[in-house]
Each structure stands twice: as C-alpha cells, then as structure tokens.
C-alpha cells in the first residue's frame, strides 16, 4: 500500500486548499517536509493523515471540535476536510473525511471511500472498514511516529509507509547519522518531517539519493522546495 497524495482543506493550520504529493519512485522512496519550530504544521500534517484514515486524533485528549482553521472560522466557513489518495495491489482509492457544522449547530463528521477507475469514482460500501483492512490502527501505532526516533521492525512495514515527525531532534550527531543510514536503506515509502537544522551536513548527504520529493512548510503553507539538493 502506498500513499499518492494528501489534500487538505481548512484543516487546523492549513487554510484553504493545499496538497502534497508523495514520492512514488521506488529508488527515491523518501518524501521530506522541512519546517521550523512549533506551530508551522508538521505535527498537524501527520495528524491529518491519522484523522482521515481513522476518524480521530492520535492524542485522545485533543479537542476534535477545533479542526477547522481559525481564519476560515472567522470568515464563516465551518468546514474542514482531508482527502488521501492511495494505491493497493494495483487499485486506486480515495478516502475523503469531512468535518462541518450542521443546521442544528452540531459538529458532524463524514467519511466517503471510493475506488478510482479512470475518471470514475465508485463509492465503496462500509468504506471505513475496508480502509482499516488495508491499514489497521495497529499500523499507525507503530509506523506513524511523533517527536522522536523509533524504528519499526520489518514485519510492521509490510502494510504501509512509515511517517516520522522530527525523528532526529533528540538524537546526538552519531545516532542521528545512524538513523539516517537506516532510513536510506528502507524499501518502503517514507515521509520525513524535519527541522531545517536536522537536514544538513552528513545526514542530508546520506539521504539525498533516496529523496524523491521535498517540500517547505511555513505557517501552514505547503510549497515545493525551490531546488532539490
């Protein structure tokens, strides 16, 4: 199973419509998102994937009613959504989860899973159950990692990609380089969200041949890096 693209609409820091394409090149299987200190949106990008797939946030104490971007709310727009396009065994799928305020003043969450065949989108009944059969929540517990380095064992990587938020931040230079070498040897799809200071020197040299896409993230705005290496 591979992720092709994520589309965000008014999800937390991400105002309006924004998207990120994952690298699909098996020899350049790493997608890098570079962002600075807290508040730019790296962790919420990770949370958007979790929410889209599972309908909740990784931290159960997070208030799900605060999903809609503040600027959008101030403009009277009370809807947020995340769509993930993915592939599994040659078939393409769309997972679209939306969050909005209904006419009764209640927050409503909906999810639609569709199979993509050419220009046609065919709705899948019991779509959420279908997606969980491809990517169970156990995958997220092991392979969707916030704020630290933890390397899943091989069996855990068979179901889907590994998503890492700030994996090098708490490591010294020796272990940071060792972690980069492990990532460079991985064959599965990888999404790395890194601070600019952690993506320099020997670490970048080790990773650069395996990076297929590189993005910059600032104040909730996703942009393609001006120059890849």
Image (tube, rainbow, N blue to C red):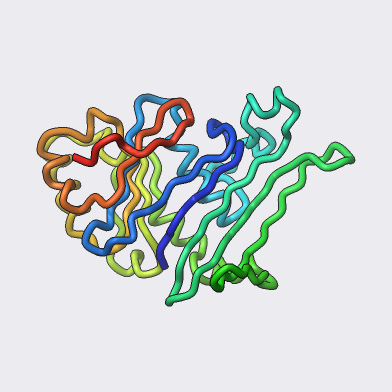
The residue sitting at 89% across, 40% down in the picture is 104
Answer left or right for 19 relative to 172: right
Classify 182 as above or below 69: below
Quadrant (top left/top right/bottom left/bottom right) for the N terminus: bottom left
Answer left or right for 79 relative to 14: right
Residue at the far bottom: name it. 89
Q: Quadrant of residue 71?
A: top right
The residue sitting at 74% across, 42% down in the picture is 100
The one nearer the camera, 44 or 28, is 28
The one nearer the camera, 180 or 97, is 97
The residue sitting at 69% across, 72% down in the picture is 125
Answer left or right for 169 relative to 72: left
Q: Position of residue 76 (x, y in %)?
A: 75, 28
Residue at the far front: name it. 119
Q: Position of residue 170 (x, y in %)?
A: 26, 34
Q: Position of residue 158 (x, y in %)?
A: 35, 69
The residue sitting at 65% across, 41% down in the picture is 80
């Amino acid at each position: 199973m591979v992720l092709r693209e994520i589309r965000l609409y008014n999800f937390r820091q991400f105002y309006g419509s924004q998207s990120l394409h994952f690298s699909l090149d098996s020899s350049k299987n790493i997608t890098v998102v570079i962002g600075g200190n807290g508040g730019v949106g790296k962790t919420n990008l990770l949370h958007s994937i979790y929410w889209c797939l599972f309908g909740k946030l990784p931290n159960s104490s997070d208030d799900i009613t605060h999903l809609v971007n503040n600027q959008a709310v101030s403009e009277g727009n009370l809807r947020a959504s995340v769509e993930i396009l993915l592939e599994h065994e040659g078939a393409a799928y769309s997972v679209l989860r939306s969050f909005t305020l209904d006419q009764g003043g209640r927050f409503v969450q909906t999810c639609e899973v569709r199979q993509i065949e050419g220009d046609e989108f065919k709705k899948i009944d019991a779509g959420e159950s279908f997606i969980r059969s491809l990517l169970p929540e156990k995958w997220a517990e092991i392979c969707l990692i916030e704020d630290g380095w933890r390397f899943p064992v091989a069996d855990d990587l068979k179901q889907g990609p590994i998503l890492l938020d700030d994996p090098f931040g708490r490591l010294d230079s020796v272990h940071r380089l060792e972690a980069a070498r492990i990532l460079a040897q991985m064959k599965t799809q990888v999404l790395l969200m890194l601070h600019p200071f952690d993506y320099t020197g020997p670490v970048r040299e080790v990773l650069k041949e395996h990076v297929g896409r590189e993005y910059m993230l600032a104040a909730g705005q996703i942009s393609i890096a001006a120059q890849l290496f």
